[in-house]
Every structure is written in structure tokens, then in C-alpha cells.
Amino acid sequence: MMVNPGRSQGQNLGANQGQPPRAVHIPGQVQGSAGQGPGGPAQRPAVLFDLDGTLVDTAYLHTLAWWNAFRMQEYDIPMAAIHRCVGMTGSLLVDTLLPPGRDRDADSEIMASHSAVYAQSWASLRPLDGAKELLAQCHARGLAVVLASSARKADLAAARKALDADAFIHHATGPHDAKASKPAPDILIAALEAVGGSASAAVYVGDAVWDMKAAVALGVPGIGVTCGGTGAAELREAGATEVFDGPRDILENLHHSAIGRLLALGPRTAGA
């Protein structure tokens, strides 16, 4: 069931109302786009997806893995605090949760321990209900579909295997694609650049406060999902344009969502 949208359909789709969305694109035609327009190559609208907690049910697995990793170094960090930081890069998460005056030599060991503990869950990863079908629908309707995640390469591969939707994904980012972690918009910028997209014709779907803040920073509508464990009120406060229960809920309300309004734009001429 869709949670009350943050804005009505008639309002500005940009996450920063009153400010022009930031245009991010690279020259050239998006692969498989609708062809050349009079002003240049056609530009396909893009849907950017977070992965962990948004498409694959991993948010609490990451939380538990970090909790164990911290305990190995004798840090007692509450799981609730860890969960709120899931979605950041490992280095930023560690820096956010641990005291600034600590011995930082242990940071790399904590991150390595998290990776080792989390890897034990790879075989049991499961997609969230409707995730594959949502990607398939976006792809079939002509949208560029991009995974905008800062997950480690091995973790990303495991999640994509569980999702089993590579046929509907045009590109996936990694931590090497961004200088700064969410809530900075770097990973979203990299995702748009990878498909020749523009912030004026894109939306971002994520489950964390940091996802919504990144969308706001770039000026794209952020669709929040509560399936990662963050409540609708927090997501909306962080800038979500609308909030859904999860991928299935978005799929069942696609035409009334920001994705549906994006579909109405159709292919755009680059530079328009």
C-alpha cells in the first residue's frame, strides 16, 4: 500500500522546489534510445535504484554484520545506530559511528570483518517482493535502469545474482565511481553519466535517509521505500517526494508515481 505521497501529481517533480534540477549528461545517444531528434540524439529518462534494502532484502544482514565486526574490536554499537547508517560507504559508516579520537588503525580490520561476516549471507540473499518485475516494467517502457549503489564489487555481484534481473539493468555503479558517499550525490551523478542521462529526467528509488538526501542534493525526485526498515515519516522529512512499502507497491501504483510521470516525458532531445 502506498503511503501518502509527499506532493500531489500536479506539483513540481524536482526534490528542490523552486530550484532548477541539475543537468548531468554526457554527449552521445543513450544505448537503445528512440533515435535522433532535430536537436541531437534522443535522451532516455532514467530510473536510478539503490540496491541494499530497496531491491534486495539485505539491510538487516548488513546491520548484523557491522555489529559483529564492531564487537570483534570491542566496540559496543547499538544495532539501531548501525541500521541508520547502512547505505553509506564502509569508511564513512565506521567514521560516523566510532569516536573521533580512536585508534584508526583498527578501521580497516572492522571493514574487513564486516565483509567476511556479510559474505556468509550471500547464498541466502533474497530479492524483495516485486523487485525484478519493477525493473522489467521500467525497462520495457523505455526507461534507462541503473543501480546506483556503493556496494563492494563482491557484494554487488551477490546481490545481483539474487535479484536475477540483469537483462533489465543498463548499468550498475560501484564505490570507485564516487569520490564522496551518500548523502553526497556523487553516486547518482555517476549513474546518470553512465547512461547519458539528465537530472531533469530522472528519479531515484531508495530505502534510507541518505538516499533521499542524495536525491535532494542533486535535485531529482526521491521515491522512498520502507522495506529497508526506515519509516515513511523519516524518509519524507529527508526529502522523499513519495513513499511506498516496497517494489511491489511501486509496481502496483506505477502510473501514479514519480516513475509514471517520468514515463509521460518520453525520450528527450539531448540539450533540450
Image: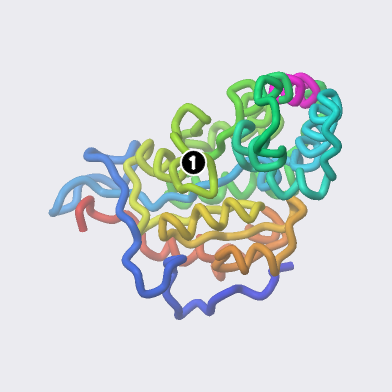
Q: Nearer the viewer, residue 184 or 142?
A: 184
Q: Nearer the viewer, residue 65 or 147?
A: 65
**Amino acid type, callout 1:** Val
Judged left or right of residue 26, residue 247 is right
The majority secondary structure of the magenta stretch comes to helix
Image coordinates for residue 119, horizontal then vertical, percent: 76, 22
Residue at x-position 38% and y-position 53%: 45
Q: In the figure, residue 196 lies in which quadrant?
A: top left
**Residue 259 rendering spot, x and y as whole percentages:** 51, 60
Which residue is under mark 1?
Answer: 146
Q: Is residue 155 above or below residue 26?
A: above
Q: Tell me which residue sits at (84%, 23%) in the image.
A: 72
Please name whichever residue, 215 or 200, is drawn nearer the observer in this view of the structure: 215
User: Which of the 4 quarters of the picture holds residue 32?
Assistant: top left
Q: Is residue 239 magenta?
A: no
> Percent position (x, y) of residue 68?
85, 29
Q: Is residue 247 left or right of residue 9?
A: right
How was the colour assigned to the protein in this rendering? rainbow
Which quadrant of the rendered structure holds the N terminus? bottom right
| Image x and y of residue 233, in percent | 70, 69
Which is nearer the eye, 122 or 40? Answer: 122
- Label 1 Cα crowd, 10 Å radius (few <14 / some 14-19 / many 20+): many
**Quadrant of residue 188 in the image?**
top left
Q: Which residues are magenta?
A: 111-119
Residue shown at 83%/44% (left/top)? 79
Q: Residue at x 63, y 56 (%)?
A: 209
- In the picture, the quarter occupied by the C terminus is bottom left
* Label 1 SS: strand
